[in-house]
Amino acid sequence: MSIGVAIIGAEKSISSVAFPGKPSYRTRSLQQQPAVEAAESLTLKAIYSRSKESARSLGDDNSDVSIYSADSGDGKGYQDLLQRPDVHAVIIALPIKNQPEYIRLALAAGKHVLSEKPIAENVSEALDLLKWYHSNIDTKKVTWSVAENYRYLDSFNHAREQVQKFGRVLSFRVKMYANVQPGSKYYETEWRKTPTHQGGFLLDGGVHFTAGIRLLLGSENAFTRLAAFSAQLQEHLSPVDTVDATLRTKNGITGTFSVSFGTTLTGSEWTVGCEGGSVSVSRSRVTTIINGQEESKEIKDDRTGVPPEVRHWGEAIESGKQNERQMPEEALADLELVSLRTPIGIACMLTLGTAGEHVTKR
């Protein structure tokens, strides 16, 4: 049986900023629509957005897709969509602060949910949402998944395989730099220009980068401690646009995490050093160094990772077993690393584990 899906939201995503060198000027919803249509187990039934105009911008090419919006009048709102028996699941891609309400309503209506990262505005809200989910929803029948396309990038998964071959991890580093300017497509959305969530762009995009390094290191190298400085380098990127951190894993290995959306430095890099060599990912190029011998390989990703992400979600619903990479506990662990809880310019030291404990309990 094909799984009927509705897409909720038509906001611009940060994917072109979050994956430097691979710009994608499509909204996240525009990436998800063809991904749903390409997945054998899924059928797009409806689209909902705040305005009828934005919803129609996704649905114009398909007359079989029903349009719902906040301004469409009686019978065409979000609650009306959730009452449709042929809609079994929803993909929610809304501004961060709006998502929890829509997630709760969909799950309570018996719909499977794939919500856009991050899991919530902060760790406290994420934990509250997780507690509500496990207390009020039969998770064997209705599942909540959180999207993170980095887990579906072939370049990162290939690099992870190399890390596993090279033995014990000795060190790691993450560097990601961008210079987000007023007027850019991804800056000119109100909820990014005036964010209610802590961290601004750093939170919205930073969870991608933490997901990337967590994938490379694996659960055997889960993070337990963090020491960091944060800063706001650009006036228009409030409340914070830069973080430089040192992380320690449960095995005592340390590494660095340096991310800025407000610098003229350029480039992206995820590197892991192991006893048998090092592995580095930059864009879709994976470089290994063994005994001083460097080998670089271009790994073709399936676009930004969204098509396989959506496909695996559909397959998991069909099989009745949730995909572990999409569990909300994994998204919570990503969020925890970029949830800055101290004023700008002040060093912070955090004991990590709230998210890790939830992941290991699954």
Image: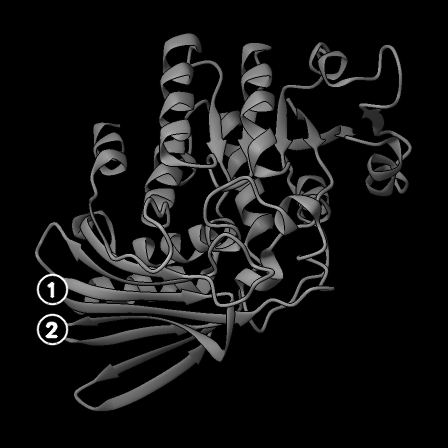
Residue closest to the eye, 119 or 152: 119
Quadrant for the N terminus, please: top right
Q: Position of residue 145 (x, y in %)?
A: 47, 31
Residue 107 visible in this rendered orientation of the protein: yes
User: Residue 109, located in which quarter of the rendered image?
Assistant: top right
Residue closest to the eye, 28 or 352: 352
Label whose residue precedes the other's in the sequence (2 or 1): 1
User: Residue 110, located in which quarter of the rendered image?
Assistant: top right
Q: Which residue is mark 2?
A: 275
- Left or right: residue 140 versus residue 314 is left
Mark 2 Cα within 10 Å, few/some/many (few <14, many 20+)?
Answer: some
Q: Position of residue 262 (x, y in %)?
A: 52, 68
> Which numbered circle lies on residue 168?
1
Instruction: Estimate the spatial distance between the alpha carbons at disc 2 and disc 1, rounded to whole Å.
Output: 6 Å
- Left or right: residue 182 versus residue 296 is right
Q: Is residue 343 above or below residue 322?
A: below
Secondary structure under tag 2 reads loop
Residue type marked 1:
Arg
Q: Is residue 58 above or below residue 266?
A: above
Secondary structure under tag 1 reads loop
Q: Residue furthest left?
A: 252
Residue 303 visible in this rendered orientation of the protein: no
Q: Position of residue 119 (x, y in %)?
A: 46, 36
Q: Is residue 34 above or below residue 78?
A: below
Tell me if label 2 and label 1 are in contact, CB under 8 Å. Answer: yes
Q: How is the image coloured?
A: one colour
Point 31% across, 53% down: residue: 214
Mark 1 Cα within 10 Å, few/some/many (few <14, many 20+)?
Answer: some
